[in-house]
Image (cartoon, grey):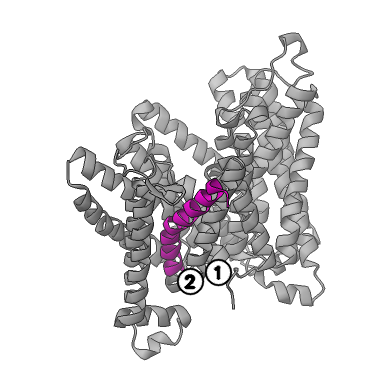
Amino acid sequence: MDPFLLEALVNGILLGGVFALPALGLNLVFGVVDVVWLCYAELVMVGMYAVWFLYTQLGWPLWLAFAACLPVVSLLGLLLHLLVVRPLLTAPPINQVLATGGVLFLLQGAMTLIFRTDFRSLGVDMPPMEVGEIFVSGTKLAAFCAALVGAALLWAFLKFTYVGTAIRAIARDREVMPLMGVDPQRIYLIASAVGGALAGLAACLLVVQLDVHPFVGLSFGPITFMICVMGGLGNMLGGFLAAFIMGIIVSVGGFWGTTEFSYVVAFGFFIVTIFARPRGLFAR
Amino acid sequence: MRYAIPLLLALACVPLLSPPDYFLHLGVTVLLTAVAGTGWAMMGRYGLVSFGHGAFLGIGAYTMALLWNMAGLTPWVGIPIAVTVAALAGVLLGYPCFRLKVVGHYFALVTLAAGEIVRILIVALRDHTGGSLGMTPDRVPPEQGLLAMQFDKSGFWWLALLAWAAGLLAWWLLDRSMASKALAAISEDEDAAASIGIRVTREKLRVTLISTALAALAGTLMAQYRMYLNPESLAGLGISLQIVFGAIAGGMYAPLGPTVGAIITIGLEEVLRIAFGTEFTGGAPLIYGILLVLFMIYLPRGIVGIAERKRRSATAPLGLPVAAK
């Protein structure tokens, strides 16, 4: 096999790992609260700014900046739920989506106001590693591993804790669960906080690979939504797998053509998928 | 409707009073934004919420500009062609969506993907479109300006007014037709509508055709007026959401709603720009965002929607207006 193609393939899988986290977070929130957070990529963007600010401006060690980023974005997720989503729980879905679209503008505007539109870079990089015939970026590999650990932790949380069971139950049937003594409002809050924390983790992994600017969310936000829809909105495993499919398409498409071309192929693939399987690739 | 003709005539006379250029500029921008918003609301009010309407502005504008720069075809001919191309693109995307019952969230996200595809294609074809740097239509000497649709602000005032009137006329005609009732029924319950003989796909396609054509018309005129095109302001998620915001803030269930929305959005932007200058970059989207959230929570029918409901309940409370939700 052509080593460059192999390298593109490996990079695609690594990229898929990074796409997987926001896709999991979005799916969790959608599955439980039944609302699409259109501003999800902007939550990630705020997290990226938090890490950049703490690390380069306040001089915190990187691990501490990462550790602080998670609760910050998690809190943002909570606020988003309390202030925007909760008053709209009974509104038509499209009003909910548009309100979170408003938060998208709000966060972009706020970050522009505070940090201007300059591109900010963390300036950390790990040396590339040579594996067999190919080179793998150390930063991307580390991000990939962290993403897998994050996904595994989420899985364990949903599978083995009492709250996790309640979350899965309410995603299955939101009418019956309140009768079993589960307070849906509390579960919504927890799901929003966990969804925010996942955005925070994604921010940590992205900030080492991308420069931060107020519109950085637009560069990976749309593809995250497409991954979720491809996997089936609310279907966590489907979204996780779809992230890798999209990662490979983008990376291998970039190997044969330009980066833009690869995104056109990926988005085109998404549209065709929706026509073929309107409820997602992995719908039962 | 009674006031429509006098109002249009009055607005048409505005440039004759030789108002300041700045006023005309605002007017043209508001009118063209209103056309795009009116186009979007034609679908939006029947539950066909598109997050990709920016794509049709872009397809229209770039088709027109490329025809002019590469083939020397005047925008007078280029705009009808560009609008047709964009409307065809809308139908091409809409047909499988409607046929395969891609609705709600899924429809919104498919249109979002389509809008992004158009934006990325414009960037990728940078040899012809100038990519992210944008492109400018070739200029002609002033004496040929009329033929090339390159004239001063009052000329564009009349063109924009014409486009705006066309949008409102389309809205009025649609409202009076059976198609509007059919679409209202579809947005309530698609299967029930189909069971009483409404051709769901056909009705949706027809309104998509009108809606995308209006968006494309707005896009072409915006590009020709500014004499500058770039992918961020004519395609992609950002501009698509701005169109949606304008229509929602004004009220998407009333014919003048998107126009009021355009006045609010453009006015807000200008007030913030004048009040704070460049010190406050980012202030406009920040305030937009807060307003959009507040509108969704407290005034989901928009400003005109609230005004209309008050009037309706004061005179004759004859049940719910069509497509009330």
Q: Which residue is the extreme one toward the front? A: A132
Please provide percent x and percent y for residue B282. Answer: 39, 37
Q: Nearer the viewer, residue A166 or B145?
A: A166
Q: Secondary structure at mark 2?
A: helix
**Residue at image point 66% right, 36% down:** B219
Identify the residue position indicated by label 1 in the image. A232
Chain ID at mark 1: A
Q: How many marks?
A: 2
Where is mark 2, residue-wise?
A: A237
Q: Nearer the viewer, residue B48 or A54?
A: A54
Magenta highlight on residue A15: yes
For disc 2, the neighbor class at 10 Å (few under 14, some 14 to 19, many from 20) is some
Residue B10 visible, this orientation: no
Q: Point out residue A217 in the picture as x, y percentages from the top left corner.
A: 44, 47
Nearest to the eye among marks 1 and 2: give it: 2
Q: Is residue A172 left or right of residue B257?
A: left
Is residue A221 located in the magenta-colored stretch of the structure? Answer: no
Q: Secondary structure at mark 1?
A: loop
Q: Amino acid at mark 2?
A: Leu
| Chain at numbered mark 2 | A
Dot 1, how many residues are within 10 Å of its Cα: few (below 14), some (14-19), or many (20+)? many
Q: Do tag 1 and tag 2 residues touch (Cβ < 8 Å)?
A: no
B27 or A202: nearer the eye? Answer: A202
| Magenta-highlighted residues | A1-30
Q: Residue at x 32, y 65 (%)?
A: A193
The amino acid type found where label 1 is placed reads: Gly
**Rendered view: A67 above or below B139:** below
